[in-house]
Amino acid sequence: MPKSWADLLDLGDRDAAAAAPSPEDAPKRRGFLRRLRESISTSREALAAELGSSLFETLDTAAWEQLEEALIMADVGARTTAEVVGRLEAEVEAGRVEGGEAARERLVELLAELAEAGRGTIDLRPDPAVVLIVGVNGTGKTTTIGKLAWHLRREAGLKVMVAAADTYRAAAVEQLGAWAERAGCEIVRAETGQDAGAVVFDAIAAAEARGCDVVLVDTAGRLHTRHDLMEELAKVGRVIGKRLGRGPSETLIVVDATTGQNGLRQAKAFAGAVDLTGVALTKLDGTAKGGIALAIAGELGIPVKLIGVGEDIEDLRPFDAGEFSAALVGG
Amino acid sequence: MFDQLSERLQGTLSDLRSRGKLTEADVDKAMREIRLALLEADVNFKVAKRFVADVREQAIGAGVLESLDPGQMVVKVVNERLAELMGGSGRELAFAARPPTVILMAGLQGSGKTTATAKLARLLIGEGKTAGVAACDTQRPAAVEQLERLGGQAGATVYSQGTERDPVDIAEWALGQARTAGLDALIIDTAGRLHIDEELMAQLAEIKKRTKPHDVLLVVDAMTGQDAVNVAEQFAAATEFDGVLMSKLDGDARGGAALSVKAVTGKPILYASTGEKLDQLERFHPDRMAQRILGMGDVLSLIEKAEKDIDASEAEELERKMRQDRFTLEDFLGQLKQVRKMGPLSSVLGMMPGMGKAMKELRGASIDDRELDRLEAIILSMTPEERANPDVIRGSRRRRIAAGSGTNVQAVKQLTRQFEQMRKMMKLMASGKMPSPESLLRGQLGARRR
Ligand SMILES: Nc1nc2c(ncn2[C@@H]2O[C@H](COP(=O)(O)OP(=O)(O)OP(=O)(O)O)[C@@H](O)[C@H]2O)c(=O)[nH]1
Ligand SMILES: [Mg+2]
């Protein structure tokens, strides 16, 4: 059973009745599940083709090399790949894992263990719970916020506020505005000249006044090498801390699945500025496998929590480590 | 990547050298390091494999085994082959005999097409042409508004028709308008699309068919990983794009993916986007880029940038001083101010030879542009005599300057030392004796050994 929204969202003692999805969503959901199956099976097929079904039958040097190649081609990275394949090879040589099928299963397990670093849930217990969304330019922050706002309402009956704290990019506020309308949630926009911290401050106050459960904060895309912009982001974190007396309950970095090894540097740099609690891995509906998320989880202990599988509002779902790893290995 | 690579090779190979003669097995070990470095830079697995095989063959042929410094020899071969891989000297945009020249932008979601469209318009306008942009991304919320705003800022005519019309029709309409208006160029922004989305790829092909662009540019994010090659092959199949615009090169991504795109599709990289501001788009220079990735700096780009940003007569005066080695801390202060006009410190330093490692240290120590304030404060606390002749700055003077600038003796010492090194380098650069990449590299490696 893949991970469900109920598994992912930690609602604490919020009203459980409100958490039940409303029945009128049922037809929509069926379509949604079909889409998911389709998008997953295409990437599965691609991977299986790459690895070849015969790979795990032989387990000779060529097979190990081929396995390494497949993981590197999935952007897992040379270091993490060498570690995982090395461990599996040792276990096979020690006779602890026997036969091709067992080796395949063990590999999926090893990869899933890597991906499952840290706390896998999204903490929405505080009232209001503030979720800060960060990342480099164009990874899908604004879109993910639109989708998440919709899902939180549909799946858990939460009242959501989005804060348009991208005060830099042209038309960023209009973009989030369009998503807020689709998702049916509230929005706080910046007034001209306001900085990101001030918008977040206003949004929290508005959320409290209007009884919102969750505040999703959209921030401007920024390259992790820009000290000034990272400092500005840290300041947004501090504003939240000061206003609430605690930090954001979640700070998610949005990583594009097509990202290569630079993703690790991105995550490191953002973790230096704000307290990252998870990754949202977007654009998994393409052919990119998002292996960089494994490297991030493995090396930095930051787990993947959400995956984006398309541009429509329903195209977001809980990350399931077993399913993801199986897709990475194929079969 | 090659900052680390030259370090690694130096380590691997100089160890071996102390044992006497190198063997082929030793070379293989070095090749593994190169392969790893390439993969870390997101060079496509298959491209890296082929590249290493090539380098190995050439390295053995070039007599690396017998040479005194095999590490340097291997790096030299890698540098040469890399520049070759990236495509010799750059190609220009094709311009139409009868305007408007039509440029179609294509790429994945979030790769940076809209910003690149406005930047390209600005670049062409800066060259004295007239340009229009067409807002054909009707998919992403507020993409049209974004282009309207950025295109306007760039001084381009913006052709938009909201999000209800078909993008193919909008493109065709915009072309008609641009022709009537007699514009030199029309740049067509399109929605980001996945290379496996057949419907949208067909739409892109249709836009191409109807507008007959002179150049189709694929926008590739410098941070892309192994999948870049798949993406490029699919876009090539649908649109036969003519060149690549590499975006987000101002980060620390090594851009191996974009290089792989060149290797696999044979399409050159024409432009590099190096920041969020509209004027941060540059011609891509493959030969210079190889050196930049190798940590040897991009002296030519730096000089070009300086020429654009720095007052010409002042620059001439400076150059004269550099040549005559009369460059003082006073001049340095003036220059510091000029440099700050050129953009954030990190992007300027990244282009200076040998600064690759220094950059890392700067970042490690979390020093940014505010550090320049400190430098300015130190220089301002010196007497004119001290600025003209920093050699006189010793014990008590150093303490006075430290106190005056609110820094410490260590910082003052460091500044004067760095200034001395800088003066040497400037003398070389200004005298036209631009150090060859190899000698720069040697200097860098030498420094590391110390
Ligand atoms: N195919 C696909 N496209 C996505 C997904 N998530 C986001 N996108 C697209 O990626 C592009 C960029 O998304 P945005 O949400 O604007 O990204 P952002 O991080 O907010 O961008 P900036 O604010 O400019 O840094 C848009 O065209 C989105 O439709 C996904 O899961 N799959
Ligand atoms: Mg955004």
Image: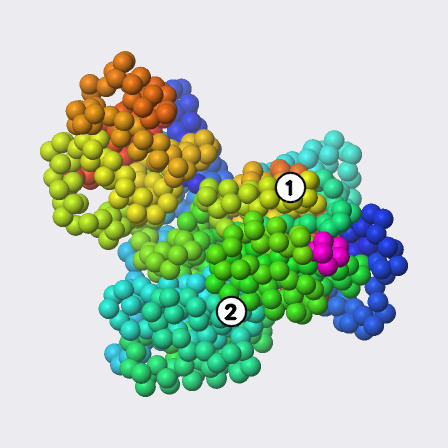
> What is the chain identity of the residue bearing mark 1?
A
* Location of residue B168 in the rendering, given as x and y in whole percent from the top left corner: 49, 81
Secondary structure under the numbered disc 1 in the rendered image? helix
Q: In this image, B204 relative to B394: left or right? A: right
The answer to which image quadrant residue B444 occupies is top left
Of the numbered discs in the image, which one, if any, rests on residue B114?
none
The answer to which image quadrant residue B132 occupies is bottom left
* Location of residue A43 in the rendering, given as x and y in whole percent from the top left corner: 66, 60
Residue, x 42% and y 51% (percent of image)?
Answer: B249
Q: Is mark 2 within 8 Å of ligand 1?
A: yes
The amino acid marked with disc number 2 is: Ala
Residue, x 53% and y 82% (percent of image)?
Answer: B166
Q: Identify the residue position indicated by label 2 in the image.
A: B143
Q: In this image, B293 relative to A122: left or right? A: left
Which region is colored magenta? A207-214
The amino acid marked with disc number 1 is: Gly
Of the numbered discs in the image, which one, if any, rests on residue A241?
1
- Closest to the observer, A90 or B104: B104
Secondary structure under the numbered disc 2 in the rendered image? helix
* Location of residue B322 in the rendering, given as x and y in whole percent from the top left corner: 16, 36
> What is the chain identity of the residue bearing mark 2?
B
